[in-house]
Image (cartoon, rainbow, N blue to C red):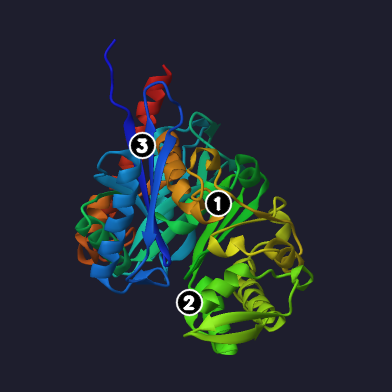
Amino acid sequence: MVYREPEILVGLDLGTTKIAVVVAERDENMREPQIIGIGQAPSRGIRKGLIINLEQAVQSVKAALSDAENMVGFDVSAATVAFSGIDSTSVTSKGMISLGRTPRQVTIQDVERVIEAAQSELAVPSNRCTLHTIPVKYSIDGNSGIDDPLGMTGIRLEIELQSVIVPSSVIQNVINCVERAGINVQGLVIKSLASAMGSLTNEETIAGAIALSIGGGTTSIALYVDGRPVRLSVIPIGGDHITNDLAYVLKIPISKAEDLKQKLSLDPNDIEVETMELDIRGKQREVNIYEAIDVVRYRIEELFTEHISHQLSDFSVHMFPAGLVLSGGVAKMRSIDPFVSELLGFPIRIADPLDTYQMPPGRNDCQYASVAGIIRYMTNRERNPYRYIETPISKLRMGPSQIKGNVNKVRKKESRTSRNESIRSFVSAIKRSIKELF
């Protein structure tokens, strides 16, 4: 028997407050990869999920990689990268093709054609590109909710696609940052999708759930219905807004405001003392705890009632019976779940990563859901390639002038070629999967 080296999977999460790296391995006897290490480092050069100082961001990535490599005992050379994708848009498009005058079975070529038809409805500006294209549902002869149409019989095939469109400059900066740190970018994933995959159970996605990750600088949202994401978005508001408000209202330094925020509970009944003394530049300063709680509650209430509720306005709350699953650093605040549940009127769960039992102590709570979710994203794409169609990383690396998107109607031929490359890659993967079955 020939021994094979274990396959190594690496995920890199570019956050506003921390950079995290997860390393997993899988040998030929393992169906699922096992997490063997997580590295992290403070994030510098990134604000609101955007790289604002490339050199500082590169050094932060190097520090997180070094931490992970020290834990696992070998060098890391490639990774799939999660990033916030500020100013990204989640767009729905539909496509329909005829299968003929008489009913027949749906083939891979038919799926390719209907995806192309749906993509042709998108209008992607030249300075943006499509990062993810996710089939939400298929319909055959008007019967909707079909998960996989291959082999089914009908005369008309329809599809609904969810496309995540991101500014090309954001993607270029992410790729440049990671590759300057010595890591080959194998793939990119929007953080809202990674966080959802790291925190939602299969039962929750099928029932209908909202995955919400509140990080240091951004809040990522993923809405799931019938097992598929129907919206992925990012809000440029996070825990740093709370910290800044505390610092401004209480007239204390940012570092002291951050420490205070981590000690507070959103339930005033949990407070044992009314005031707390802080050492500020060698002087004792007394702050009112109830005033601090009011500041935090107001900011979180604003986030949910004015921003997150806007993302839900096109959907009925009855579509999400599994409720809302919270992750990210802000989710660690005491009593945040009953407070948010009261605001929105449906159940809340604080999510530790689904693979938390594999993760090292101190790096296995809700703020590590997104980095753990990268590994799940990689394996899910591998297992079900038709669910997550990506623009090849080689195209994303080229820059906006060479990424024509999916619907350049002036240069139709070039657009169709660019469009079909990602479709062909997923079709080839399906063919390989069919061969393996037989």
Residue underneath mark 2: 255
First along the sequence among labels 3 and 2 = 2
Is residue 207 toward the left or the right of residue 42 in the image? Answer: right
**Real-space CA distance between mark 3 and mark 2, rounded to the nearest whole angstrom:** 51 Å
Rendered view: 289 above or below 399: below
The image shows residue 231, relative to residue 155, as above or below, that is below
Quarter the C terminus occupies: top left
Secondary element under disc 1, as helix, strand or loop, is loop
The picture places residue 286, in percent across and down from the top left corner, at 63, 86
Residue 340 lies in what quarter of the image? bottom right
Q: Which residue is mark 3?
A: 427
* Quadrant into which the N terminus falls: top left
The amino acid type, in three-letter code, at marker 2 is: Ser
Cα separation between marks 2 and 1: 22 Å
Name which residue lies at 59% across and 86% down. 285
Left or right of 216 on screen, residue 406: left
The x, y position of residue 52, in whole percent, is: 31, 74
Q: Quadrant of residue 40?
A: bottom left
Disc 1: CA contacts within 10 A as few (<14), some (14-19) or many (>=20):
many
Mark earlier in primary sequence (1, 3): 1
